[in-house]
Structures are given as structure tokens and as C-alpha cells.
Image (spheres, rainbow, N blue to C red):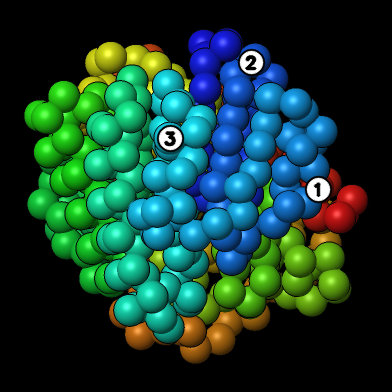
């Protein structure tokens, strides 16, 4: 899809960015990643760093001068904005740090236009829906973000639309809960990896609250496929798209699935909610994704969990 093209990715040393980079390099693209390594890791790019068509620049993408220096030198055909403060716990504890990402968004779009990028993609989030007003979450539903993280993502989506009118093609991709190898499984990290780590350590998965909250999980390879298709398809220009499986699962069910995947007999441990006001329901409608890029996620949950567990065991 992108053979011979130059792709710039902010936040490329992170979970999603590094998987996307591996895929782009395998397709013959040249890639430059800019990442401050705040949550990203060089280890995620172990394979990419052996490739002559890949370069990692360790730098803050929220600093317009830093960002301009890479746009100016690399002259990308495509640019993807992933750099952001992420994680429910981290973003809620540091709401003002999250707002600094607005600087990065603003510079990213201005520079992409200035350096004549063919198309941009912006990583948005299901957090723009906040506590959903309607379900399943559809792209044209009213937004109801409850956190600065959700607000910043909603602003990023508006940049996509505004710059589209100014002649810069772009698409905003609303990611729901992606999981897979390389995802942060620390205390500040994400639920699938945390449950796997707990069971690996012989402990029951710790469920916050009653476990009836739902999330819509998608395996990272499906996410990467959807991102690439969205990036190259003119049908996504100026559009906001849910990138999802569209099959919600409760956190209690997730804990049970992880236990089953390990062949263990234990019960999840229920503890008090870790933060006030955590979003209760996530269930996305993926019909726009299917219509615009002809994609339906392929990886079943059991298979994705098996692959993720395998990675945690090897790590
Ligand atoms: N993983 C998910 O389930 C999910 C869901 C919704 C949205 N997203 C969005 O997708 C994108 C990628 O998320 P991820 O899960 O890979 O998270 P991640 O933390 O693994 O990746 C984010 C990367 O951005 C880098 N970064 C952060 N601030 C930076 C800055 N100012 N300058 C340069 N680099 C910076 C980090 O070091 C990290 O490598 C983010 O924008 C996130 O908001 C992810």
C-alpha cells in the first residue's frame, strides 16, 4: 500500500506506533519516528532499528521547532499523530500535562500543510464519547468527553475537519481498547496486560468495581490494518471513524477469559473502583469503518489473548 513512500509517525516508540512501523517497513515504506520515550521504549523498535529505512528521533513532539526540523528534513508523504499522554490513571492524575498535547496537535497540522503532506491520520479515542448518550457509539453521536484527554482528542478531530477544508487531506481514527504485545501492563497500564501479568504471577486478576463495565477490545494487528487502509483511502478524507470490533465485553468476562486462557481455576478479586467517574459502558458501531475501508476485524478475542499471553511469557 505504501511501498516507496515516506511516513512520519509521532509517538512511534509506543505500543500502537511500533506495530504500525513494523508493518510499514515490511511493506517497503521509509519511516521516521519522533518520540520522547516518555511511555514508549526503544525495545519496541528492536526490529525496526535494524532497518536502514527507519530512523528514530528522540524529541518532544509538542515543541514546534523540534517537529518542524523533522518535517523539513524528512519531507514525508504521509504523517500520523500518535504522540500523547495515555492511560486512564496517568491522564486523570495529570490533567494539565495532557493539555500540553494541544500544542503538538496544532503544530502537527500546520506543519503537515506547510510541507505538503499528502494525507495525515490523527489517533483519537473512544474517550470523546465520555459516558455515552446513545449506544452503540456512532460517529455522529453527540460527544460528551469527561476528561482533558477526551477534550484534547475531540479538538484533534476538529483540526482534521478544519484542515481538510484548507486542502490537507486527513482522517481522525477513534480507537477503542486496543490490546496486544508491547502494551504497557504496569500499574499505570492497561487492563488486558495487567490481568495477564497478575495470573502469570499466580494471583487473581484485580477487577475495579463490580466488573460489569464494558469495553470493546480489538487486537493490535486489526488496528494496524484499519489504520493503513484509512490512511490510503480517499473515502476517509475529512472523516472521523470508529476503529473497533463492535463486540463489547465486561471486565468481569475479560478476567474470566484470561483465567481460562491460562487453564487456571481461580476467581477474579473485586476491589473498590480505582478512580471516580470511570466510564461505565463502551460499545461501538463499526459500520462506518466497514463501509469506508471495507474492513471487518479478523482476530477473535481468544486468539488475540493467546498471542498476547505468549508475548508476556517470552518477555
Ligand atoms: N492503545 C489504545 O487502546 C488506544 C485507545 C485510544 C486511543 N489511543 C491513542 O493512540 C495513540 C497511541 O497510543 P498507544 O496505546 O500506543 O500509547 P503509548 O503510550 O504506547 O504510545 C504513545 C507514544 O507517544 C510518545 N509520546 C508521548 N508524548 C510525547 C511527546 N510530547 N513527544 C514525543 N513523543 C511523545 C510516548 O513516549 C509513546 O511512545 C495515542 O494517541 C493514544 O491516545 C490508544
Position above or below: 10 against 151: above
Residue 12's place in the image compared with 212, above or below, is above
Closest to the observer, 232 or 198:
232
Identify the mark at residue 43; answer none if there is no mark.
Answer: none
User: Which residue occupies 51% across, 11% down?
Assistant: 1
Which of disc 2 and disc 1 is earlier in sequence? 2
Disc tally is 3
Above or below residue 237? Residue 92 is: below
Please state if 199 lies on the left or on the right of 166 as rendered. Answer: right
What residue is shown with label 1? 311
| Coordinates of residue 315 in the picture (x, y in percent) | 86, 55
* Residue 301 in view in this figure: no
- According to the picture, the residue beneath numbered tag 3 turns out to be 72
Residue drawn at x 62%, y 33% is: 21
Q: Which residue is mark 2?
A: 27
| Badge 2 density bin: few <14, some 14–19, many ≥20, Cα 10 Å | some
Q: Residue at x 25, y 16 (%)?
A: 235
- Circles 1 and 2, Cβ within 8 Å, touching? The answer is no
* Residue 164 position by quadrant: top left
Q: Give the number of the mark in front: 1 or 2.
A: 2
For label 2, the SS is loop
| Left or right: residue 247 compared with residue 160 | right
Amino acid at each position: 500500500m505504501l511501498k516507496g513512500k515516506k511516513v512520519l509517525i509521532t509517538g512511534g516508540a509506543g505500543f500502537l506506533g511500533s506495530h504500525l512501523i513494523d508493518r510499514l517497513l515490511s511493506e517497503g515504506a521509509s519511516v521516521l519516528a519522533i518520540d520522547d520515550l516518555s511511555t514508549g521504549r526503544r525495545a519496541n523498535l528492536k526490529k525496526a532499528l535494524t532497518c536502514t529505512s527507519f530512523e528514530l528521533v528522540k524529541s518532544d513532539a509538542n515543541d514546534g521547532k523540534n517537529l518542524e526540523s523533522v518535517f523539513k528534513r524528512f519531507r514525508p508523504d504521509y504523517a500520523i499523530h500518535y504522540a500523547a499522554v495515555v492511560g486512564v490513571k496517568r491522564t486523570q492524575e495529570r490533567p494539565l500535562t495532557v493539555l500540553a498535547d494541544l500544542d503538538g496537535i496544532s503544530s502537527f497540522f500546520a506543519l503537515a500543510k506547510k510541507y505538503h503532506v499528502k494525507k495525515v491520520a490523527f489517533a483519537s479515542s473512544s474517550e470523546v464519547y465520555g459516558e455515552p448518550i446513545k449506544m452503540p457509539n456512532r460517529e455522529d453521536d453527540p460527544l460528551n468527553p469527561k476528561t482533558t484527554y477526551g477534550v484534547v482528542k475531540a479538538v484533534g478531530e476538529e483540526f482534521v475537519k478544519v484542515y481538510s477544508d484548507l486542502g490537507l487531506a486527513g482522517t481522525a481514527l477513534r480507537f477503542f481498547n486496543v490490546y496486544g504485545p508491547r502494551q504497557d501492563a504496569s500499574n499505570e497500564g492497561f487492563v488486558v496486560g495487567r490481568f495477564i501479568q497478575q495470573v502469570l504471577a499466580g494471583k487473581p486478576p484485580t477487577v475495579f468495581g463490580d466488573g460489569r463495565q464494558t469495553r470493546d477490545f480489538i487486537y493490535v494487528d486489526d488496528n494496524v490494518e484499519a489504520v493503513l487502509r484509512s490512511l490510503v483511502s480517499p473515502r476517509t478524507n475529512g472523516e472521523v471513524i470508529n476503529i473497533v470490533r463492535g463486540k463489547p465485553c465486561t471486565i468481569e468476562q475479560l478476567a474470566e477469559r484470561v483465567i481460562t486462557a491460562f487453564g487456571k481455576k481461580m476467581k477474579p478479586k473485586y476491589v473498590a473502583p480505582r478512580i471516580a467517574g470511570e466510564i461505565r459502558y463502551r460499545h461501538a458501531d463499526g459500520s462506518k469503518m466497514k463501509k469506508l475501508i471495507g474492513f471487518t476485524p479478523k482476530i477473535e478475542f481468544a486468539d488475540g489473548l493467546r498471542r498476547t499471553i505468549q508475548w508476556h511469557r517470552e518477555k
